[in-house]
Image (tube, grey):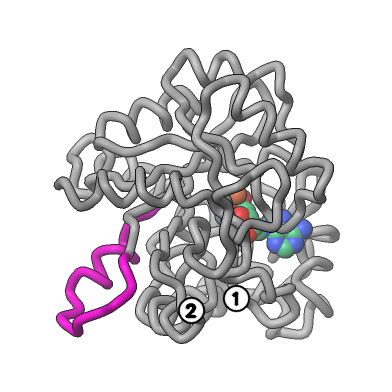
Amino acid sequence: MSYLRYCLDCKKGIADLHVHSTASDGHYSPYELAKMAQRKGLQYLAITDHDTTAGLEQLENMKEPRLLEIIPGIELSTEYEGHEIHILGYSLDYNNTKLQDTLKTLAVARRERVYRIVKKLQEAGFMITIEDIKTHAVDAVSLGRPHVALALLEKGLVSSISEAFEKLLTKGRPGYVARYRILPQEAISLIIGAGGYPVLAHPGSGFDLKLLPILIKEGLLGLEVFYPQHNLEMQEYYYQIAQINNLLITGGSDFHGHEGNDNSFFGNIPIPAYTISLLTRTSKNR
Ligand code: AMP
Ligand code: FE
Ligand code: FE
Ligand code: ZN
């Protein structure tokens, strides 16, 4: 039974298509996420770590039979003329060499960036070390500011993760270091090259719609219409934009699982049945 007037085949509680694990900046391991999704009764889960597919490899090595189907995913951080744009990729062959070569470069750049952030913070009088950060990033292939924020919080140097970002880690603050980023066009072509579906993540988080035709021309296939920070008006708006442009309508919670986050959206975002059947048909065909 659908409850969205404009999306007749939308359902909640079947799938979550946007989730982060310990391979990037999530709190739970891929295995824990799979178990949690199963307990919630989800049938499909896409793990979409920032700039890494290491979490998917961890799940592949697990022999335990599962009712849950994992949709291979990723969320690539890109930049276009000063705009930060996140591109999700679904049902991709994550062993693709070109993709993995780029991910290796990004992982090294992210690691070096964290070293530079630590140095800048130390210079500004915040005494954290790279070891402090590593304790919050044991399985992280893709290091990021959230790991630094957690270390600052643990050391009592800030009183919350959001304070760490606002006071120290965003542009213009003492611990800010820009990240090496690829272009959204490159991200789209990498995902397509690996046989996946490129989808624009959370357009409501500051995406300039004027850029949409550029991404579509490059091969963008979907739009993340359903997202915790999209209110009903935004959902309807992006739903229309997706339809007009023939884009696949997706949704996901962007669950990171950290204490203090609103974690209630995990597995609780509407997703059209058509989207799931398309994404899973592709992964089964490999
Ligand atoms: P990075 O990829 O290292 O630049 O870090 C970006 C990640 O930090 C995002 O994907 C979010 O998970 C997280 N993040 C960004 N801004 C904030 C904020 N203000 N508070 C908490 N987490 C944030
Ligand atoms: Fe994140
Ligand atoms: Fe994102
Ligand atoms: Zn995300």
Q: Which mark is residue 28?
A: 2
**Circle 2 crowding by C-alpha within 10 Å: few under 14, some 14–19, many from 20:** some
Relative height, residue 97 to residue 65 (above, below) = above
Secondary element at image label 2: loop
Gap between marks 2 and 1 measured at Cα:
7 Å
Q: Residue at x 46, y 69 (%)?
A: 21
Disc 2 vs disc 1: Cβ atoms closer than 8 Å?
A: yes
Residue at mark 1: 257
Q: Residue at x 46, y 86 (%)?
A: 39
Question: Horizontally, is 164 left or right of 112 in the view?
Answer: right
Which quadrant is home to the N terminus?
bottom right
Secondary element at image label 1: loop
Tell which circle, 2 or 1, labels the residue nearer the N-terminal end: 2
Q: Residue at x 77, y 84 (%)?
A: 156
Question: Horizontally, is 213 left or right of 56 in the view?
Answer: right
Q: Residue at x 15, y 81 (%)?
A: 63
